[in-house]
Amino acid sequence: MPNIPKVSIIIPAYNAMTYLPTTLASVLQQTFTDFEVLIIDDGSTDHLHQWITEILDSRVKLIRQNNQGISAARNTGINNSKGKYIAFLDADDLWETTKLEEQIYLLDNNPTIGLVYTWIKLVDHHGKSSGRIIKSHIQGNMWQQIVEYNPIQTSTVIVRRDCLDNVGIFDQNLSSAEDWELWVRISFHYPFAVIKKPLVNYRLHQNNITKNWQITEQGLSLVIEKVFASLPSDIQNLKNRCYGRGNLYIAWKTLQTGDKNCQLSLDFRHKAIKHYPQLRYSPQFIRLSLAIMIRQLLGTDSYSKLLTLIYTLRRHLAQ
């Protein structure tokens, strides 16, 4: 009888060879070892197929398909996986060595928990820490919080297969926020847990899909309307909060992608508070407003140099 791995790790890959080797290395260095790795080649044109032949670890498997997008690639991985638990990892992110061990221990000892996520450390394209950690303390029956906004990055997630069997997999019709929409569906039925450690390193680089604010804007309304179509009328007031937080998120993304004169950032910031006026008092809104003001005063080049200096100081303080 063939050995069935406890965990299936799904890595979608589309022309990802710049970072994929180090991403896979972070998986193979895990202290927990009972897993399979399914790399889903989503129509790549780089040398992924040649590279995979050099990987001698039998736990690593390649599945090839025509280019269909990240949700379809993840779904292909789910449909071909064998594990009791399913973990997701983007091809440019990195795991700390104890990531799987800590999450699986929590799931094994808390059978009602459906999904476990972790904190995130932001790193540059070389894997060097920026000194910034993205934290969330939300856990338990958290569907009301997660309906309002998504605190969970996909590469941090381990979910029970039973959860996906019950609620379904990623919606391939969504162009963005498809992960958030799935977490919402899961949260209606299962409590979540968070490990309050940065066990995932999220690379910041020019090709991050989350920096493509146009895709995010196009998908924002579609995903929010789908989420709220199935919710009771007494919490429909949360929809405006979702639109507000979504527009605030896009405002940040436009600022990061060279928004000339910050006009796009200002426009999306205005849309955010139009939907959700209380956002103007939030730390995220205040930080955005300060960043816009500083960039307008200093210009793009000086603003970028200032960010580099801040990140360097953070790295030193974090050591």
Image: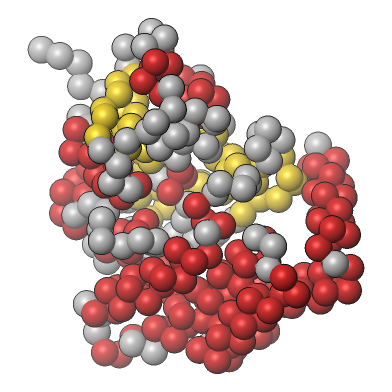
| Residue 200 picture quarter | top right
- Give the farthest residue toward the left: 1
In the rendering, at what x and y percent does residue 261 appear?
Answer: 75, 75
Camera-nearest residue between 246 and 159: 246
Image quadrant for the N terminus? top left
Describe residue 316's horizontal placement relative to residue 248 as left or right.
right
Q: Is residue 294 left or right of residue 140?
A: right
Residue visible at 41% across and 9% down in the picture: 54
Quadrant in the rendering for residue 75: top left
What residue is drawn where x is 60% and y is 42%? Answer: 203
Q: Position of residue 304 (x, y in %)?
A: 81, 56
Left or right, 238 with reference to 78 = right
Q: Is residue 282 above or below residue 304?
A: below
**Above or below 250: residue 41:** above
Q: Quadrant of residue 179?
A: bottom left
How many numbered circles are shown?
A: 0
